[in-house]
Image (cartoon, rainbow, N blue to C red):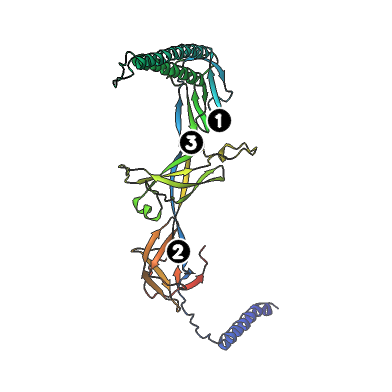
Amino acid sequence: MKMKRAILPLLVIVIALGLTFVLLKSRKTPKPHETPYLGPLVEVAELVKTNRQVIVSGTGSAQSRYEVGITPQVKGRVSELSPQMVAGGTFLDGELLFAIEEVDYQLAIALAQSSLAQTELELLRNENLADLARKEWHALNADSALEPNPLVVYEPQLKSARAQRDAAQANVEQAELNLQRTRVFAPFDCYVRSEQLEIGQFLNAGSPVATVVGTDQIEIVVPLPLDELIWLQVPRKGTQQKGSLAKVELQSGGQKFQWQGAITRALGEIDPRNRMARVVVTVEEPFSPDTGDAKLLKDLLPGMFVEVHLQGEELADVIAVPRGALHDNDTLWIVDDENRLHIRAVDILRRERDEVLIRSGLDASEKIVLTNLSGAAEGMLLRPQLREIK
């Protein structure tokens, strides 16, 4: 019994070894299989020719076209003050800002009119005397060819009387003008930047009391590199040429606000600090109409820092490629029909923020490599995957 227990494990081992030997002998050796090398996987895009409008971008701060100080031309106490005559208040062209007490100027008109009446009476008396004197002289000197002495026919007296009448008339007109100047109106559509006015305050002629800023036009001075000016239309003095259109943008709070404008002129010098030219973009309607929307950012306010996109000339039959596809020495990587890499030098017409516009060196329907490769070489095998350029 003990002998059987000792032999049984040995028998199992021998049988297992036998089976293993049989399996090893019956196994077939696999034939080697070679996988062809297809090259690294790269993204490629097919090129197309298109017409492209040049967009020149810049930045600048908005500022009003007009800003003036309000200065009364006559003195007196403030008798009327518009409720809008506070910092930030808005006015339309011709609306009353404030008024000065009129009584003194109405009295001045009455005195000037009285003086005018006296000079007109004196002129009439001298005209009658002159007419009578001339008739008497001709009656006494009917056969004489001589002209009468001017003193005899009151010519100096008439000249003096007419001068006094004209001066009195001018005094009346000046008094009436001073009365008109007691009421001060908005010189254009504007808002109040600052003011120092109160009812009853005494104002001296020629002393500034407020500053108003125009709201009908906003200007933005945009610095640009000199080589960008060749794409833009900038009006010259004495011509009817229209400037390039512009889109003014402000990004704030996750929203984008836009206004339309145009180049109206260039500043007459190059900035010596950065060698940049400066063009002026004018926005004709910077303030949105009153539609009940109280959002202040719908208005292009002076002091806002904005982006300006200027519409330049249109380029015909150019090829646009992503800037990331451009390599050293202005070269692009082209993949041919056999998936081989070719390094191609191109003639660049313009470099934009995200794209490069190619004038020559490429043909439509060719494919460029968009993926960066380390150790790229002429004739290198690639595995292209087509992607559309957006």
Name the amino acid type tagged 2: Ala
Name the amino acid type tagged 1: Thr
User: Separation of disc 1 and disc 3 at Cα?
Assistant: 14 Å
- Whether residues under marks 1 and 3 lie with C-beta atoms below 8 angstroms apart, the answer is no
User: Separation of disc 2 and disc 3 at Cα?
Assistant: 37 Å
* Residue 239 visible in rendering: yes
Q: Nearer the viewer, residue 137 or 192?
A: 137
Is 82 located above or below residue 348 in the figure? above
Residue 83 rendering spot, x and y as whole percentages: 59, 23
357 with respect to 24 (left or right): left
Disc 2 designates what residue? 320
- Whether residues under marks 2 and 3 lie with C-beta atoms below 8 angstroms apart, the answer is no
Is 256 located above or below residue 295 in the figure? below
Mark 3 falls on what kind of element?
loop
Q: Nearer the viewer, mark 2 or mark 3?
A: 3
Residue 183 rendering spot, x and y as whole percentages: 53, 21
Measuring 35% from the left and 63% from the top, which residue is drawn there? 328
| Number of residue marks | 3
Which quarter of the figure is the N terminus placed in? Answer: bottom right
Q: Nearer the viewer, mark 1 or mark 2?
A: 1
Disc 1 designates what residue? 90
As drawn, the residue found furthest toward the right would be 1
Residue 362 rendering spot, x and y as whole percentages: 40, 70
Q: Nearer the viewer, residue 77 or 171?
A: 171
Residue 333's disc is none
180 with respect to 240 (left or right): right
User: Separation of disc 1 and disc 2 at Cα?
Assistant: 48 Å
